[in-house]
Amino acid sequence: MSSPDDLTGPGQQLFEKRKKVFPKAIDGPFRRFKWLVMAVTLTIYYVTPWLRWDRGPYAPDQAVLVDIANRRFYMFSIEIWPHEFYYVAGLLIMAGIGLFLVTSAVGRAWCGYACPQTVWTDLFQHVERAIEGDRNAQLRLEKAPWGLQKITKRVTKHAIWLLIAVATGGAWIFYFADAPTLARQLYSLDAPYPAWFTIGLLTATTYILGGLMREQFCIYGCPWPRIQGAMLDEKSLMVTYKAWRGEPRTHGIKRAGPAVHQPDGELGAQPQYGLPSLVALASNPDNNPRVIGDCIDCNNCVAVCPTGIDIRNGAQIGCITCGLCIDACDDIMERIGRPKKLIGYSTVADELIAGNGGAPEPPLKRLFRPRTIAYFLIWGAIGLGLLFTLGSRTRLDLSIRQERNPIWVQLSDGMVRNAYTINVRNMEARPRNITLSIEGLPGAQIWTDAQSRNAASQSLPIEIGPDQARKTRVYVAAPERTRRDLTFAIRANDIQGGSDRENTVFEGPEGAQ
Amino acid sequence: MAEKRIDEPTGTPTVGHEWDGIEELDTPMPRWWLWTLYATIVWAIIYTVLYPAWPLVNSATSGLLGWSSRAELAGEEEAERVRKAPLQLALSRIPIERLNENSRLMQAAVEGGRAAFKVHCVQCHGSGAAGSKGYPNLNDDDWLWGGDIKQIHTTLVHGIRQPGHDETRMSQMPAFGRDGILTPEQVGDVVSYIGFISRQEKASTAAQRGGKLFADNCAVCHGPQGKGDRKLGAPNLTDSIWMYGGDRDTLTQTVTNSRYGVMPAWGARLDPVTLKMLAAYVHSLGGGEDFLPEPVATPTPQAAASATPSNPAKSNVQP
């Protein structure tokens, strides 16, 4: 009555219920690498706000500080003002292209090792295993009726998760205020309201994303895995199940005996399985005809997978390439005496060659291919451009706004007066003494609106506080009746110097010449 | 009658009604949606009880909380009044000529004046206070009646030629041509002389004749050199600023028909603090002069009184 495509018919569900994942503990090189990355990233995350950096008496001494209230961003020796936010934008673009580069070279390494979602999920899973036991114990507990033991374990687990989440959110806010001061305020419960709100928000996101959503976020929530499709090609490293080696797989180790190879390539009559054949396989694997694959279908790779996928189904969106299935499979291969890396980092191209008995491409040649080189060049060019502009940026800045209402004023002595708002930015953490002068207008006088015209002269001294912008309204009077180009210039009066110029116009009653 | 059954293709029950063979499937709203609807209904009932809602004959129910937007506005205005009270008090106490001693107060006054100017003054003086023909530019350094903050304040409070106001700034230029004091030729000579002293025209015999006429008719107010007299609001005729225009045609018109600019006495309309603020703002526009305490006894009041058109001094000017 209803076709399989008829989604309105009974039995068709658009919603797939989550299959809970209970990843098994595993040890191996990739697991240890993940531990290392976790330790490094978490250390960076928690320690960075506490690093100090001396910037003198007029600037904060926190090495990395996003000072939203005062609109400054400090990162070690670099201080960024809001109008220089393109440096941050540039860094973000570099991070984006860096992801492209890493992805095309070594696959989803970001997803598998460094992504906060992965790191915190991993942390939460370790906590889970420490309290509820390994995979099997967790499965049993899940099925067990609610009792004292189950309640205790679950409450403990969620409590520790929440503690980690609070610590995560608590560390985040230290990037936005002086860390020791804020820590004291938190301790004495008089921290500002936004701090508490941010802690609460990030506690919630950490707990929900790392504890409850986990792999669902990677598969359904994150756009990045979907962009990977455009980044990966047949020469990108991926965690790959070598199907040419593993297939046909056999069910369970007990039946993993050598089969009789038939000339037509099909499996013949099933031989006697049992311990002797296993021993024969283990003791002399190379004599086995390649009729049954190395995969014994032990499901160890599936059991350890933090996203609960079966890597043997090939590349898929759920694979974050964390490499844990490699550790799991190597462990089994070692035990049954087969070569390791039935599952391993490999490329589609290499597997095609290897499946046909050829030798894979040398890794360096694979790494340096047009795609990776192009990404690297773009990435490097942006980085060099940022460094260059950072090195050559001026720390003294002048901007001019001419007053438009009225645009000129006739003075009684025949001169014409214009008014300008001068904005001088001193982007260094010390007070500076500068001189403002005008060029291109013979006979012109300049004075500020705080002075009387008697004090007018050719140039004006301006004092600016450290790390501040100062607005000054100035009048310029000149014996001009037509529009003339006018240049304002500032020059610092200290040894370090520094200057800036800005062009504007002087307007008169007779307009343009 | 109504007979519920399971619709076979969809597996969904029907509501049980049937019209000419047309049946309706019973697919209720999702439960969460339904509860949201109920919640909004409950919320609406609570809201209409707490806040003004139900229309009555003359007004509406006031709600248990007694909230109204007018009361809220009044509260905000009151809060703003309380916030500004110290500033208002300080401004009302300080003499206008000593306002510049307190830079914070001065700044507040200028900003307050900027707002008040936009309401009361822009109609004549323009939004940038640049004036127009007949209405002085307040940005420049030329003042008819004085440019220090106290003089500006006085002008603001008492106005200029405000009818029926005793203390208003008063003077009246005779209509030399219209009233027959000078012949049109003489007016032309005077205009030539003004063109000469304002460096717009070269010396000429007409200007020479005009100089004599100027000394007899005009110098009493505008000064022997034509530099004007602020006591009388007589403009300086030698500078580059002309309120009505400095060209021959306009000057001829001015001398022939006179000028009689009027500004209201704002003292009767605005509160003292606003007047001080306006004075501070106008003074801040770039042409404000420093206040110099002047000697009390000056001979000029006498001259000013004698120079008014009702009692012209040594001239044959008739009112």
Image: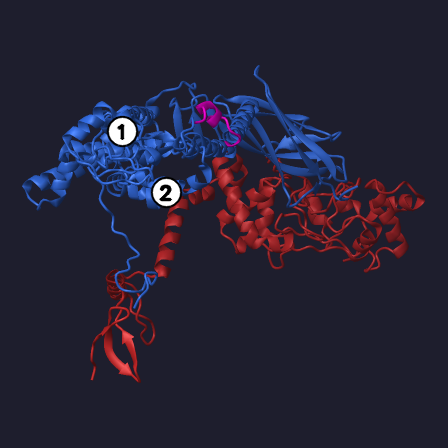
Which chain does the residue under circle 1 lie in? A
Q: Is residue A170 visible?
A: no
Residue A506, x across and y down, in percent: 71, 37
Query: Number of marks in the image?
Result: 2
Which residue is rendered at x = 46% and y = 40% of the image?
Answer: A230
Chain in blue on the image:
A
Question: Could you tell me if residue A402 is visible in this image?
Answer: yes
Residue sitting farthest toward the right? B205
- Pointer 2 local density, CA inside 10 Å: few below 14, some 14–19, many at least 20: few
The relative height of residue A208 versus residue A472 in the rendered view (above or below) is below
Can you say whether B113 is above or below A443 in the image?
A: below
Of residue A274 and residue A241, the one placed in the foreground of this image is: A274
- Please name the amino acid that badge 1 sits on: Asn
Q: Do labels 1 and 2 share a chain?
A: yes
Q: Is residue A368 magenta?
A: yes
- Residue B128 lies in the magenta stretch: no
Give the secondary structure at mark 2.
loop
Which disc, if any, is residue A288? Answer: 1
Which label is found at residue A222?
Answer: 2
| Location of residue A83 in the rendering, given as x and y in whole percent from the top left corner | 52, 34
Q: Which colour represents chain B? A: red
In this rendering, the label closer to the viewer, 1 or 2? 1
**Amino acid residing under circle 2:** Cys
Segment colored magenta: A360-371
Q: Are marks 1 and 2 in contact (CB under 8 Å)?
A: no
Q: Between disc 1 and disc 2, whose residue precedes?
A: 2
Q: Residue furthest left?
A: A148
A51 sits left or right of A256 in the view: right
Q: In this view of the protein, which residue sits in the foreground, B254 or A386?
A: A386
- Where is residue B269? Give x, y as percent: 53, 56
Q: Residue at x 26, y 34 (%)?
A: A295
User: Who's the residue at 23% across and 32% down the image?
Assistant: A258
